[in-house]
Image (cartoon, grey):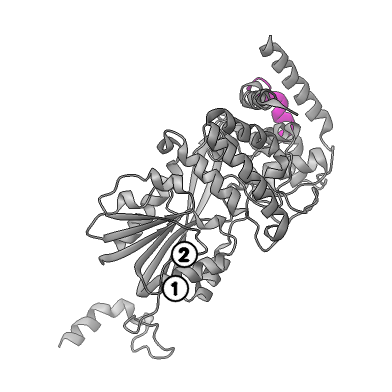
Amino acid sequence: MRSASCSDGPSSPWELVPFACPLMRAAALLRGPGSLLLRASSGCWCRRFWAASGEAAAAAASPGSGARSPFDRQLKRKQKNWAALQPEPAKYDYLREEVGGRVADRVFDITRTFPLALDVGCGSGYIAQYLNKETVEKLFQVDMAENALKNTMETEIPTVSVVADEEFLPFKEDTFDLVVSSLSLHWVNDLPRAFREIHQVLKPDGVFIGAMFGGETLYELRCSLQLAELEREGGFSPHVSPFTDVTDLGHLLGRAGFNTLTVDTDEIQVNYPGMFEVMEDLQGKYIFHKQRMGESNCSWNRKPILHRETMLAAAAIYQEMYGSNDGSVPATFQIYYMIGWKFQESQARPAQRGSATVSFGDLAKINALISREKK
Amino acid sequence: MSGQGVWLRARERLRRFPELLAGCRDQAAAYGKCVAATTTGPAELRKDVCTKEFEALKECFTQAAKKTMK
């Protein structure tokens, strides 16, 4: 029954995958106790989860599984809801806080006031807490987990909370001046569609500022697990959800209709005592007792069991290959920040090729050029 | 399988991994080096290429687990 709630779909355990991106969801072994821990903690919540996990399994078995939708959104929603209910979320959400702050910085960089803004996948409102009334006059916060919306952080901006899926935004076209999203689009099944939806709800000359996990995220964990599984079991399968590549991101945004794209990347390295702490920090945050972030792997082709021996082997490899002298190990989070604009006539366009009037070679004489023009 | 007991115990066991692993640094390092060597050298990483080192690590680990259980 527990493995049913894992909803694995029709994957063979030894599928060799060209990438394996573990967002560590340490094994059904841990998920099992997790779902039962829920029972211990609150009666009616767990009963709902239990019943719902049945339907998640059913949903999983049918069109959900496979390449078209690698993520089980139902499961994700439950995880997020559960994570949001835990006390002291702030302590564990340092990553989302940090990235939320950096996205807010980019909003401030645009010297405009946005009358109406939308935060897609807002969580506890990580971005909103850094923004002020001069920049954003009214904010809609959208998340698929209603519990997250109930505990949003304080912000001086008037907000409206909406429970909705990122792939099906319930807003009319041309509504928002600004759309932001921080670390929530990497779970979306149909990313092109999500981008199209965002583009649609934006007003002309509106801007979308987003942050997503990049392909290098958690590569140490991913590699250690792969090597351990290869050596111990003879094959490996993905335990970490797939992250978008930067070139793909550019193409997706372009196809969705955004103009004047910029994508820049940032790496945040967090040090942990060891691999188990990494796994607990990511995974545990999401389902289990102490966990907050809600990011455990909902990928369909998870292998059901990550054997304890393999985990031990992986921990040893992680330490040896990536550990530092003092015994701590790093975990890398690569973040892509993207900015895209919705077209409007008044926007500056790139000039035609061959229309230059001065050459770069004349840069040295720029003072002379300027004074000549003044005359 | 029934009862939360089983799962809670399993979870507890896993929680102790880091401290148990701390007591087996040498074996872990040996195993890690063995695997890392296959990624750079001409030898391919295949199943059970480093079994010896892993068995040593597992032995150390189980010993440590037994000791702390008492």
Q: Is residue A327 above or below residue A267?
A: above
- Magenta includes B23? yes
Q: Which numbered circle lies on residue A189? A: none
Label 2 close to label 1 by CB (< 8 Å): yes
Q: Identify the residue at horizontal 55%, vertical 56% (top origin).
A: A186
Q: Identify the residue at horizontal 36%, vertical 59% (top origin).
A: A140
Give the labeled residue for mark 1.
A200
Q: Is residue A23 above or below residue A137?
A: above
Q: How far apart are marks 2 and 1 (CA)?
A: 10 Å
- In percent of width and height, residue A273 lies at 55, 30
Q: In which quarter of the image is residue A247?
A: bottom right
What amino acid is found at the position of numbered circle 2 in the picture?
Leu
- Magenta includes A350? no
Q: Secondary structure of the magenta portion, mostly?
A: helix
What amino acid is found at the position of numbered circle 1 in the picture?
Gln
Query: For the view shown, which residue lies furthest in the left direction?
Result: A375
* Range of residues picked out in magenta: B21-32
Q: Of B27 and A42, which appears nearest the observer? A: A42
Q: In this view, does A157 lie to the left or right of A63?
A: left
Query: For the view shown, which residue lies furthest in the top direction?
Result: B70
* Mark found first going from the N terminus, 2 or 1: 2
Q: Which numbered circle lies on residue A169? A: 2
Q: Of A223 and A138, which appears nearest the observer? A: A138
- In percent of width and height, residue A43 lies at 54, 31
Q: Identify the residue at horizontal 70%, vertical 11% (top origin).
A: B67
Disc 1 residue crowd, few under 14, some 14–19, many 20+, Cα 10 Å: many
